[in-house]
Amino acid sequence: MAVRGDIRNVAIVAHVDHGKTTLVNAMLQQSHVFSEREEVPDRVMDSNDLEREKGITILAKNTAVQYTGPLAEKYGHPEGITINVIDTPGHADFGGEVERGISMVDGVVLLVDASEGPLPQTRFVLRKALEAKLPVILCVNKVDRPDARIEEVVSESTDLLLGLAQDVMEEGVDLDLDALLDLPVIYCAAKAGYASTNVPENGGLPDNDDLEPLFESIIANIPAPEYEEGAPLQAHVTNIDASEYLGRLGLIRIYNGTLTKGKQYGLSRVDGSIENFKLTEILRTQGLDRAPVDEAGPGDIVAVAGVSDIMIGETIVDPSDPKPLPLIHVDEPAISMTFAINDSPLAGTEGKDHKLTARMIKDRLEHELIGNVSIHVLPTDRPDAWEVQGRGELALAILAEQMRREGYELTVGRPQVVTKAIDGKINEPMENDTIDVPEEYMGTVTQLMADRKGRMDSMSNHGSGWIRLQFTVPSRGLIGFRTALLSATRGTGISSSISAGYAPWAGQIVTRQNGSMVSDRAGVATPYAMQRLQARGNFFVDPQSQVYEGQVVGVNNKPDELDVNVTLAKHMTNMRSATADVLETLTPPIKMSLEEALDFANEDECVEVTPEAIRVRKLLLNRDDWYKWRSKQRRRDGNK
């Protein structure tokens, strides 16, 4: 096999908030991608508005760093070695992006927080790297944290690596254990831009003031791309992008052969058919920009134009000798939501140019399938509703939020789990959940998990005042759990989870102890009515806002459902009164985000999503119809 020595392809993988994007920022800065006068924002790779607001990476993105340090000449490339870096998400719900990113590279840099150590997503991404037989560089980040415990984290990460390697080998994957035991370790403070191979003191900066040791470790330990000389073209489509001038772009990794601008090639479709096309443009990544080139060879990661409907997983091949690559494998979805048209009385009344029709929503969901390999869109028994399946509720909530910002109006159902029939029994998806909380909340969290059919697997205390609890829990038990955890631990609890396969149905789970306050008529919410009712619960609506029959206007203090009239007006009398006094005594309403609204909604409720508002409402708006439906449900449950 021939080797392309002037390229390294590497993915940065880690648990959420362990510093991947900050590290890529520092690598770009020290590679002089930005000019001296250019102001560089934090987390420059998080270009999506939602990514910046939520502080997480949602989409896998690539950049290129030109290394011209001393190792470049040693390896025979004094002009520099191109390091293609893939920045992957850290949240398990976006695991499809991680799998796509890993499919493009020849090795990974595993980033682990020097205090938190390996967490569920660390296990997930590391297992994927080992299954692909990729070499691993361990990078312990945030070594300057006051609560850093560097040596313990390295030991935990090594134990995790060897444990996962044994699991993977038992499944038939042949791994080099000697190479895994000789794991290269870099100690890093990404925010400061420091890295070293020497172990710093806990809470101290590395003894080197740049990232040169990290670059050298990547050059030395990540293998250069290999290819077969004279082999026919094989270029895998791993991502989709768009240009206002060129149309849709396919981001590809070339494994064999050469691409030349203007030539004719074949595109091997997902169904196995071959479609010929002319390659109109090749764009190579340089820093954060793309520059046109005439040719790209083995090992290159480039964007190409020429096919208007190119899809992820397809392969660009030589039409005379097509040899397509296997499709990208993505784990099956575990959570589903129903996306439907907005049929509330306020639909289309809040703004112009809103996208309301079933055709528009269906086209948008089909468009999402092009670039998102981890979701499925299935028809339902209604022509204006679709079941959307994904890895987790956050991934689907992000899709609904993106559609809302694009001007769509829709209703989104409460998250449900995707079940399987195994040996004639219903099985549901399970999760391994890791929770970090202060010691005083251990009993509270244990009770929360017990209510959700969670089983404690382990508990560890590092002596810092925090404990780590690990549970196995049904996926549906985690729907709405994050909000409950934050409330119970005064905002201090941290929860993260990954899939743990399927297990028999665990029984009924009651996750909400409070009933809903439901408007029994349409009208305008009045301060007078809300003041009279606020002792019964907390409101979601503002005074003087429009409400309709069946809208959930608040949460009841008691478990029962409560029909309320929030439109009651104060009758005129001979007595004068200052209405301002009424407004001053009203408790401010609760403002929920889309994720919080989805967590709050009961099984008979859904969330109305518009560009201007997020409302919880009943599936059946007419109260008489709803009471008839509830009576049927109770009779059915009583006969079981």
Image (tube, rainbow, N blue to C red):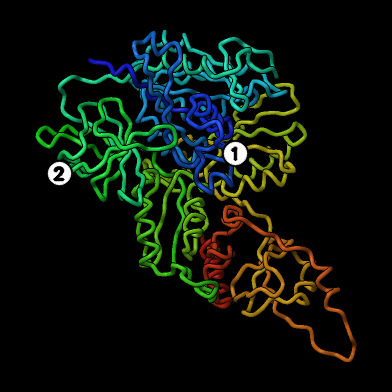
The disc labelled 2 sits on which kind of residue? Asn
Say whether disc 2 or disc 1 marks the residue closer to the N-terminus.
Answer: 2
Dot 2 lies on which element? strand
Look at the picture and state if 408 lies above or below 401. Answer: below
Residue occupying the point 53% across, 42% down: 474
Residue occupying the point 59% across, 9% down: 198
Q: Which mark is residue 19?
A: none
Q: Position of residue 351 (x, y in %)?
A: 53, 72
Q: In the rendered image, which residue does mark 1 sit on?
A: 454
Based on the displayed image, in which of its 4 quarters is residue 489 positioned? top right
Based on the displayed image, in which of its 4 quarters is residue 79 positioned? top left
Q: Position of residue 12 (x, y in %)?
A: 47, 28
Q: Position of residue 63 (x, y in %)?
A: 42, 32
Q: In the rendered image, which residue does mark 2 sit on?
A: 276
Please indicate whether residue 633 sits to the left or right of residue 524 in the image: left
Please indicate whether residue 485 sits to the left or right of residue 222 in the image: right
The disc labelled 1 sits on which kind of residue? Gly
- Give the CA separation, mark 2 to mark 1: 53 Å
Q: Position of residue 481 (x, y in %)?
A: 62, 46
